[in-house]
Image: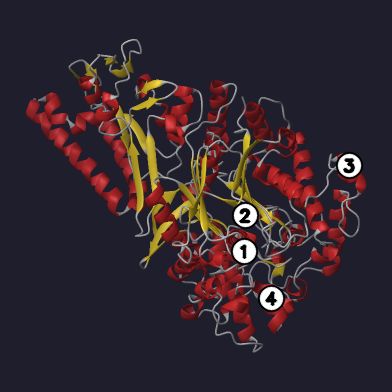
């Protein structure tokens, strides 16, 4: 016995075919689960050139071998698809209890393809899988949808889309348990394109391991000695909002569309402000850290806002009022759009107005118009038709390419790279566009002790981070447990009854990373796409610890070349045949 | 003596009420405050006779503080792992609900054995009984009539297909749900002495 459920559930929404098939054990061995295994299935099944919003694209809900166990911080479910926002491969994690319910229902993965003729939700109760008419739910927000499904089905875990996903907004997210999102890259639009309003899952089965007493002893010890420690407990005491103060101090808090790295109103959206409004702590299923802060601020209830929302929809829009950001956040969660991309898009439109390039009615610091943005985007109303398509589209249409803060069409997360140069390389080389969840060198640079204003050693730092997170998100362990690969290997070895070392995991991480790159290369991605907006290379920051800093373009390009070289990729960013074969990917044929 | 005890107990009950009120109204502060109150409470309780019995039964039992629970479900996973050797909340003898509602409510509840022992009284075959104060099922006597399942006011007792009647025996005094609860929302102690204090010492 090992901690896989052992089966994959395949659902074709066009034919209504439902198939339960054994897990590909050979792939599970090489790619673990979660992100890696999801990539493997997607690469087998889907042509990299597929239109992301066509029925031929798949959306995969992938658990990991540690999901539904007592291993701390294992509540997340990975959603894998081809992104409508970037045209790249995409994995995006969602917290809550979806992964656990899928495993207890008997599945390591749920793979959905096709398109339903009319809106449905998928109901999964163990072996019983059915398509439920969702015409009455179409048009409703995520919160109302979830409440309605739970009241008719009972205690199911629901993951659904709102109007954003229904209207195929490329920044549409999937929402579960009201405030947990698979936010980035437009996974919600993929569900919308399939007329899939929601999935509702309830499992009554079990997950086992060979030696339960030994496993419990190991996991309990790890939890006490390595999870519930100062290195991780910030998640419980403060949550991600603690990064507002840290970023302000380091001069990397995105401010007014990344025009600066400090915000004079940061205290209003700080961890202290969030804590002051907190009414309850909330965790994912299987997490002892409980990063969630359920807050009440001037009549607004929301779990959050997380750091990314405070930064991109707060300081980056010139908003320093917690209740305004909380309302923006709650609206986005309910309407089903990503707060990071929505915040960036609003901020970009604000700068267009500031510079007199175009007036879309938005101004830095103006709350009323700002609070209209989520609805305009989700319904694609008026200027929302443009806003919904994100920063890259806006800059192509109206101008401002130099300060369009995106990579591969995905808007920046909340770490100003001019104050932490490794982040520019992390954003440029991330498999899904500008992202903080692949490598996070800012922890060592701006928040740590490494010199943030040099590229020396940063290519390797970024590579190490990408491999580590690829393995964590395949296992699946949340980002917020800074687990060592040695401990992860020890736990996986016990859960799967086969010996694994940290080196094995690093190699697996590299294999997963290269697989994603092969898909993206087949989509046409090359060195030209691994870059950043001109602003980070040409405009110095004005205030704070990183004042007067900007990134030397030649230094960046040299670091990128070094990154490719260390990876065994050619100068254009294509994995060499030797590298591909050394990772056991030589026989791979991309699907379709 | 009785009067003094009743006085102490009613004081302690007022403290407990105060805690739960705080939890309901301002969970944010209860998160920090109730822990220290619970600590005070424990110290006070320990200063009393540690072997309070009622008809030979121990009064130790589980206690759940919704203000502290964040819905990680470790209690369910630990219970099923220890009792059944697998991770399976549907087999656990405790269950937690932690869910948001559209009106802004975060519903936090737990179903667990609070030691009322109505199941023992109701069992027609005397299969359910107490050993050293812990609830046990004699599988030889149990007919799986499910009367205990119906009688349990908290819905804790289950008749599991591959197992039979599953009850909470507090892990014989070392409840694993409490051990794994990361935030101290679950505790194990003499709360019965508070809730039924009057009658117990009466």
Q: Which numbered marker is on residue A513?
A: none
**Could you give the CA–CA distance between mark 4 and mark 2, rounded to whole angstroms?**
31 Å
Q: Do labels 4 and 1 share a chain?
A: yes
Q: Name the residue under label 1.
A: A414
Q: Which of marks 3 and 1 is in front?
A: 3
Is A138 rendered above or below residue B69? below
The residue wearing badge 2 is A14
> Which residue, as the protein is rendered here, is positioned at the far front?
A15
Residue of label 4: A393
Labels 4, 2: one chain: yes
Label 1 sits on a secondary structure element that is loop
The span from disc 4 to disc 3 (Cα, nearest Å) is: 38 Å
Circle 3 is placed at which residue position?
A581
Nearest to the observer: residue B161 or residue A451:
B161
Disc 3 element: helix
Residue A19's image quarter? top right
Q: Which of marks 4 and 1 is nearer the N terminus?
A: 4
Residue A464 visible (yes or no): no
Instruction: Tell me which chain the residue with mark 1 is part of.
Output: A
Mark 1 or mark 2: which is in front?
A: 2
């Amino acid at each position: 016995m090992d901690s896989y459920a052992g089966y994959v559930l395949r659902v074709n929404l066009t034919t209504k075919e439902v198939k339960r098939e054994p897990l590909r054990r050979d792939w599970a061995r090489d790619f673990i689960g979660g992100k890696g295994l999801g990539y493997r299935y997607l690469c087998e099944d889907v042509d990299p050139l597929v239109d992301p919003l066509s029925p031929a694209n798949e959306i995969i809900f992938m658990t990991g071998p540690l999901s539904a166990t007592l291993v701390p911080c294992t509540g997340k479910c990975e959603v894998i698809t081809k992104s409508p926002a970037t045209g790249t491969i995409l994995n995006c994690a969602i917290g809550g209890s979806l992964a656990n319910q899928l495993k207890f229902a008997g599945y390591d993965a749920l793979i959905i393809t096709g398109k339903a003729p009319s809106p449905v939700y998928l109901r999964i109760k163990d072996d019983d899988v059915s398509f439920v008419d969702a015409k009455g739910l179409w048009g409703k927000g995520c919160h109302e949808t979830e409440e309605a499904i739970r009241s008719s089905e009972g205690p199911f875990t629901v993951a659904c889309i709102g109007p954003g996903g229904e209207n195929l907004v490329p920044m549409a997210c999937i929402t579960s348990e009201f405030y947990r999102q698979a936010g980035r890259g437009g996974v919600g639009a993929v569900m919308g394109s399939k007329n899939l309003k929601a999935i509702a899952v309830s499992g009554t089965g079990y997950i086992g391991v060979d030696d339960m007493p030994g496993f419990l002893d190991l996991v309990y010890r790890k939890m006490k000695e390595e999870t519930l420690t100062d290195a991780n407990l910030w998640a419980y005491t403060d949550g991600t909002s603690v990064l507002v103060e840290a970023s302000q101090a380091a001069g990397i808090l995105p401010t007014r569309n990344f025009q600066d790295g400090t915000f004079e109103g940061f205290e209003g959206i700080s961890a202290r402000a969030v804590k002051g409004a907190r009414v309850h702590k909330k965790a994912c299923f299987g997490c002892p850290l409980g990063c969630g802060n359920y807050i009440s601020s001037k009549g607004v209830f929301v779990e959050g806002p997380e750091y990314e929302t405070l930064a991109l929809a707060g300081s980056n829009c010139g908003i320093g009022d917690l209740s305004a950001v909380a309302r923006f956040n709650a609206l986005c969660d309910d309407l089903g759009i990503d707060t990071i991309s929505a915040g960036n898009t609003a901020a970009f439109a604000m700068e267009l107005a500031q510079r007199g390039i175009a007036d879309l009615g938005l101004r830095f610091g103006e709350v009323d118009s700002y609070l209209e943005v989520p609805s305009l985007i989700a319904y694609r109303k008026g200027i929302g038709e443009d806003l919904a398509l994100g920063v890259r589209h806006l800059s192509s249409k109206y101008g401002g390419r130099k300060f369009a803060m995106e990579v591969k069409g995905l808007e920046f997360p909340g770490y100003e790279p001019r104050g932490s140069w490794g982040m520019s390389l992390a954003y440029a080389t991330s498999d899904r566009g500008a992202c903080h969840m692949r490598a996070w060198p800012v922890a060592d640079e701006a928040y740590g002790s490494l010199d943030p204003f040099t590229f020396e050693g940063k290519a390797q730092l970024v590579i190490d981070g990408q491999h580590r997170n690829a393995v964590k998100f395949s296992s699946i362990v949340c980002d917020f447990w800074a687990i060592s690969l040695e401990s992860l290997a020890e736990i996986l070895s016990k859960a799967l009854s086969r010996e694994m070392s940290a080196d094995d995991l690093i190699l697996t991480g590299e294999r997963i990373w290269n697989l994603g790159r092969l898909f993206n290369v087949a989509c046409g991605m090359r060195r030209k796409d691994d870059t950043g907006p001109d602003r980070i290379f040409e405009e110095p920051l004005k205030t704070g610890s990183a004042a007067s800093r900007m990134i030397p373009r030649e230094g960046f390009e040299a670091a990128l070349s070094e990154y490719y070289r260390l990876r065994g990729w050619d100068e254009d960013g294509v994995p060499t045949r030797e590298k591909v074969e050394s990772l056991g990917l030589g026989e791979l044929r991309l699907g379709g | 003596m009785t009067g003094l005890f009743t006085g102490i107990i009613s004081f302690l009950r007022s403290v407990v009420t105060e805690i739960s009120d705080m939890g309901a109204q301002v969970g944010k502060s209860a998160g920090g405050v109730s822990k220290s109150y619970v600590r005070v409470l424990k110290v006070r309780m320990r200063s009393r006779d540690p072997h309070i019995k009622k008809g030979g039964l121990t009064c130790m039992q589980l206690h759940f503080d919704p203000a502290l629970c964040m819905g990680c479900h470790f209690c369910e996973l630990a219970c099923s792992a220890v009792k059944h050797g697998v991770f399976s909340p549907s087999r656990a003898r405790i269950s937690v609900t932690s869910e948001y509602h559209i009106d802004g409510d975060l519903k936090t509840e737990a179903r667990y054995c609070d030691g009322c022992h109505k199941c023992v009284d109701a069992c027609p075959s005397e299969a359910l009984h107490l050993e050293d104060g812990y609830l046990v099922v004699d599988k030889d006597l149990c007919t799986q009539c499910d009367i205990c399942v119906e009688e349990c006011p908290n819905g804790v007792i289950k008749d599991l297909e591959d197992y039979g009647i599953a009850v909470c025996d507090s892990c014989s005094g070392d409840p694993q749900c409490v051990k794994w609860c990361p935030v101290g929302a679950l505790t194990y102690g003499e709360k019965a002495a508070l809730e039924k204090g009057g009658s117990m010492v009466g």
